[in-house]
Amino acid sequence: MESVFSDLYLSLLFGYELMNNMKTDKITDQQRKALFAFHTFIAESMNEQGITLAQLVAEIQPRPTKDTLHALFKSILESMHLKDTTKSITREEMSNVLDVYMDALAMINLHIPFPDQSKRTLLEFYN
């Protein structure tokens, strides 16, 4: 993080060359780790202050994507079954999480059937 801020400061002093490099240079492993640590600090502070994810999402209004929706699904999974990956869940756990997920979608009037008519059939389909 410090590197990004120092690059920004230097670019203000010495022109835009460093800023242009920031647009194309990938973040370092250290910066990626700092981002994860930052998210940990945010989550801890939000939990301590009773701030919900819904409140943050209402402020940011992120665009729904496959990845953001998968992260939401995994968040439900972690809350219900203390698992943070879908790789090791059972059919029953997936069914439980899908019930909550589908109920939430229905609450916003979004009725999208699973690729098959029933969750059980879909779960069997992917085996």
Image: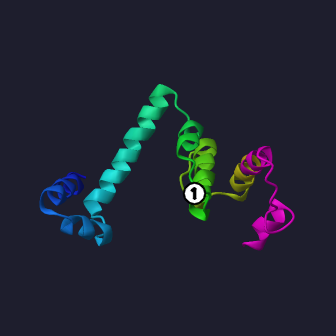
In depth, the one of 71 and 85 nearer the eye is: 71
Q: Residue at x 13, y 56 (%)?
A: 13
Q: Residue at x 72, y 58 (%)?
A: 91
Report x, y in % for residue 22. Answer: 27, 66
Report x, y in % for residue 42. Answer: 41, 39
Report x, y in % for residue 89. Answer: 63, 57
In depth, the one of 126 and 42 nearer the eye is: 42
In depth, the one of 4 and 107 nearer the eye is: 4
Q: Is residue 38 left or right of residue 84?
A: left
Report x, y in % for residue 126. Answer: 72, 72
- Is label 1 in a helix, a strand or a loop? helix
Q: Residue at x 57, y 36 (%)?
A: 55
Q: Hey, which quadrant is residue 16 in on the image?
A: bottom left
| Mark 1, other Cα within 10 Å: few <14 / some 14–19 / many ≥20 | few
In depth, the one of 75 and 95 nearer the eye is: 75
Magenta extent: 101-127
- As for residue 120 lying within the magenta part, the answer is yes
Q: Quadrant of the C terminus?
A: bottom right
Q: Is residue 34 left or right of residue 14?
A: right
Q: Amino acid at mark 1?
A: Thr
**Extreme residue toward the top, this view:** 49
**Extreme residue toward the right, this view:** 117
Instruction: Give the residue at mark 1.
Output: 68
